[in-house]
Image (cartoon, grey):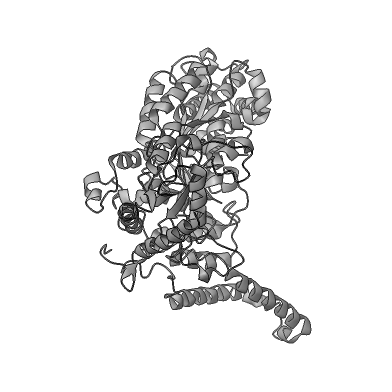
Amino acid sequence: MPASDDAFIHPLFLGPAAENHEILEKLVVEFLRDHVYWRRNFHPEDGQRIPTTAVNQPEFQDFLARTKKELYKLSADLKSAVPFFHPRYIGHMTADLLLPGVVARILTTLYNPNNVSDEAAAVTVDRELRVGTQLARMFGYATESKNEPCAWGHLTSGGTVANYEALWNFNSVKFYGIALQAAAHGFDVEFENMGPLDKRLSEYTKWELVNLSLDQTIALRRQISERLRVHGDAEDHFRFAKAVRGERIETRGNAAFFLEHSELKPPVVLVPASAHYSWEKGMKVLGLGRANLIRVEVDGHMRLDPIDLRTKLDAAFSNRVPVLAVVGVLGTTEFGNIDPIHEIVAVRKDCRERGWDFGLHIDAAWGGYLMSMFRETDGSFRDRDEMRSEHRYFPSDEVHAAFSAVREADSITVDPHKLGYVPYAAGAFIARNREIVDFLTQKAAYVFDLGDAQKETPMDTKLRGLGQYILEGSKSGAAAASVYVTHKVMPLDQTGFGQLMKKTIGTCEFFWDEARERAERWKDRVTLTVPFEPDTNLVCLAINPAGNTSLAAMNRFGRAIFASMKVDANRPVQVKTFIGSYTSLTKDNVGGPQADRILDDLGIDRATFRTLPKDPEREADHIFLLRHTLMNPWLQSKVEDRNYVEMYWDFLDELIDGALEDV
């Protein structure tokens, strides 16, 4: 694909002005007719249930009239929808949709498959599992059945549910060793030479059992199963399986489990201060407790601080508190920054040498598809110098190292409906070791139920009963078809999706250069800063009137600027020159030293950053930022002599002038 112009983009989207409408129309009509023929040829000997004269009946015409009325009203109302498809929209994480995914979604919806199992959706369950394999390969996981571990993945309604699933997976495995040990009491079989410490199962302390890695717990479970096969019979398997289920935390509940095992404390989860709010929701939903979500400080690049991570892990382990997981973010939803995944991996290695362990999850809901830029067609990881030759700044040493370490994580969240440019809803959860599903199934786990190993159901077959292993039940197969077809048309490597990602990164670099140039040009009127060097394709701006030292005044100024860019339900979107978004930095998501640096750069008195309970506007307890998501591929295309980025900066110039008049 050529990188010097927009030619490779031209067939991908419907287009800002619906330039490819004939292609979309022809494809939809073609596959609509194909669907009609499919229906007509399913037992055509049965004839028709709707007579050809039905259309002439008053009831038929009345129903049709009411349907058209509501559809026309809906269509009219949708004209007030946000024009995500257009380069004048630079707000949230959405843009135009790739045509292959749109058409696949529409045509599959007519078949209405329910991806809860292959009995309800034989075609699209297969596509969903293949999507999991496609994404797993992009992240560097092994995906061949002969591999151990072998990865798997599936689609979710979004990153939030995928993050919930990560917590569910980790919690199911973390305390499984305790259940095995409790179930083994009174059993005739001797469980000797078990696990990584090569000793009797009964001799393990509970602290040792909760600090086994995910892979070690899976191996221990298999080892015990094998011992039962050798020294027991089918009845032993059944009784042991029942005993294990009775001792598991999922059966007993958190309260009863920790009362029974009083020497253990409830686990904690560590996330960066910049993490998505879904992690707090997940802790509450799964009963893990909001108080057990520990936030790790961020550094000057809004990335997780490895030093503070070590400090908080040391504190947890020293107090004998199990650490369920550490979460690294590959592209924060607010700022797009990349956590140092390689540093987290190094910290975990050090912890394991001390007998401590935790799960590692990567929340790549936003930045996951950027991995396609790093991946060669043969699956190898690209050299940083080669990539840097194609960009001005990307990737930095830290960002390149972070992406190279993603394959060490136990699981990953990624959202195809963000940088995958497919219709909502399409999130994804990917796990490095697919054997984890045996801890989640709503049926008795096979390794304890069958004495003959030859009768074990192959994992590839088991996973087709998808609903047993995921949080959701009924789910649309159309989403799976949409993502699968898109990935087949645009491979998840540097020749496919990587080219599209490369263009968005190039736009971000252009925008960042322009920000610094404008900051110098406007310095007599305002102080403009980019608080964090962009790691991906999001850029935030803070703007303060020259000479102002009050944070509340700066925030009011920023909101006055943003008022011309926000969607107003009472006005047509066509009157908006550009549509943007905003975010805020609070004392919860940015550390004191980082807040001080930003305030100093803006010329704001640090003492004005405070919580004022009696202030109804609450303009002093945060730092207001304009937030720009630069994922639209047309942002550097020109209208006459300016591209959309330059047009935006000229527009912002006008808004600043207007806001200054009111100061």
Q: How many marks?
A: 0
Q: Give the camera-side residue of 188 and 35.
A: 35
Of 172 and 296, nearer the camera is: 296
The percent position of residue 235, horizontal first and vertical second, equals 63, 27
State whether residue 282 is above or below residue 368.
above
Locate residue 434, reporting x and y percent. Answer: 47, 39
- Is residue 43 in view? yes
- Residue 51 found in image quarter: bottom right
User: Up-down: is 585 above or below 223?
Assistant: below
Q: Position of residue 392 (x, y in %)?
A: 25, 51
Query: Measured from the top left, where is residue 328 in percent x and y?
Result: 44, 37
Picture quarter with the N terminus: bottom left
Q: Is residue 415 above or below residue 320?
A: below
Q: Is residue 627 left or right of residue 46?
A: left
Residue 123 seen by the camera: no
Residue ranking furthest to the top: 203
The residue closer to the viewer here, 533 or 430, is 533
Kindly identify the residue that appears in the image at 35 percent across and 63 percent down: 646
Residue 613's quadrant in the figure?
Answer: top right
Q: Nearer the viewer, residue 198 or 503?
A: 503
The vertical placement of 190 against 118, above or below, is: above
